[in-house]
């Protein structure tokens, strides 16, 4: 009996802390103490979300942002207790469970994903092996670094901010976000050809760079020599940036 009462008290407290504006507080708990817990929960979660998604935060006024964070706390059931993974949980909420309000931009999920990628790469424990010595870049078997993520969006998320809020999707935007050997996270905008080359490298199962570029030339219906020349220069740059590893 006592255990059932304790569990129900915990659930009542949890429901209240998730949605204090609509759920009744647990009986017998001083209002001042409830306020401390309420602010502690909200401020901690809001702080991690604001820190992880600064551009998204800049697009909202205080009331709109608070409503978004409150919706996350109330509606989403996190699968991890770790604060560092709150950003990933918030992204999952926006992608899968969130019902957009009139104040929410159409690119909210894409922008959140782009900002989350920067954090994910920054804290990633993946390591890149040293680059092998080679004399012919076309003879290597290229692999994509685990710290280099090719991305595709419908909105130009890398340009969005308070002064630029597109209302409609455009042609696909290709970006590469990667972490350098100095542990700096950087991005570059890609053209469709480089984006396709990186995708081929990402799924490469042993083909040489020459083979991949020859295949790319066929897809683009371009002269193979021209694509080989472009590809050799592009691959050399990507290897220097530790995006492609050998």
Image (tube, rainbow, N blue to C red):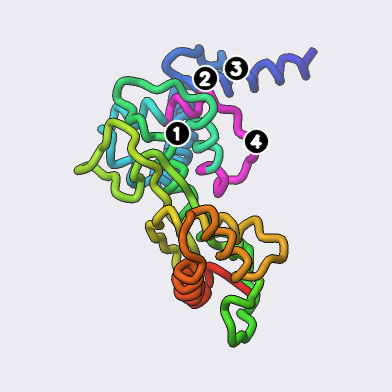
Circle 4 — which element? loop
Q: Earlier in the sequence, mark 3 or mark 4?
A: 3
Q: Earlier in the sequence, mark 1 or mark 4?
A: 1
Quarter of the image for residue 104 reads top left
Circle 3 — which element? helix
Residue mark closest to the camera, 1 vs 4? 4
Disc 1 target residue = 42
Circle 2 — which element? helix
Badges 1 and 4: C-beta atoms under 8 Å apart? no
Instruction: Considering the whole magenta stretch, tell me its main secondary structure.
Output: helix
Mark 1 and mark 4: Cα distance apart in space? 18 Å
Image position of 106 with respect to 212: above or below: above
Q: Residue at x 56, y 65 (%)?
A: 213
Disc 2 target residue = 16
Disc 3 target residue = 12
Where in the figure is residue 58, as x and y percent of width and height? 28, 42
Badges 2 and 3: C-beta atoms under 8 Å apart? yes
Mark 4 and mark 2: Cα distance apart in space? 20 Å
Disc 4 target residue = 79
Residue mark closest to the camera, 3 vs 4? 4
Q: Is residue 231 magenta?
A: no
Nearer the observer, 105 or 47? 105
Mark 3 and mark 4: Cα distance apart in space? 20 Å
Circle 1 — which element? helix
Magenta part of the chain: 69-87
Nearer the observer, 132 or 94? 132
Q: Is residue 75 magenta?
A: yes
């Amino acid at each position: 009996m006592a255990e059932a009462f304790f569990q129900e008290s915990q659930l009542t407290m949890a429901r209240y802390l998730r949605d204090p504006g609509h759920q009744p507080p647990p009986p017998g708990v001083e209002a001042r103490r409830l306020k401390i817990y309420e602010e502690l929960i909200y401020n901690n979660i809001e702080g991690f979300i604001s820190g992880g998604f600064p551009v998204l935060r800049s697009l909202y006024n205080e009331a709109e942002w608070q409503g978004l964070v409150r919706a996350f706390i109330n509606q989403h059931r996190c699968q991890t207790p770790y604060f560092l993974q709150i950003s990933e949980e918030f992204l999952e909420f926006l992608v899968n469970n969130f019902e957009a309000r009139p104040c929410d931009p159409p690119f909210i999920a894409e922008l959140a994903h782009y900002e989350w990628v920067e954090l994910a790469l920054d804290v990633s424990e993946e390591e890149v092996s040293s680059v092998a010595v080679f004399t012919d870049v076309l003879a290597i078997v290229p692999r994509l670094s685990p710290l280099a993520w090719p991305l595709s969006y419908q909105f130009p998320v890398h340009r969005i901010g308070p002064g630029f809020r597109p209302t409609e999707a455009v042609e696909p935007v290709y970006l590469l976000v990667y972490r350098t050997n100095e542990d700096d996270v950087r991005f570059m905008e890609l053209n469709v050809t480089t984006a396709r080359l990186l995708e081929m490298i990402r799924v490469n199962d042993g083909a040489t760079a020459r083979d991949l570029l020859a295949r790319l030339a066929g897809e683009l219906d371009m002269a193979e020599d021209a694509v080989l020349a472009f590809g050799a220069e592009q691959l050399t740059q990507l290897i220097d940036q530790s995006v492609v590893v050998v």
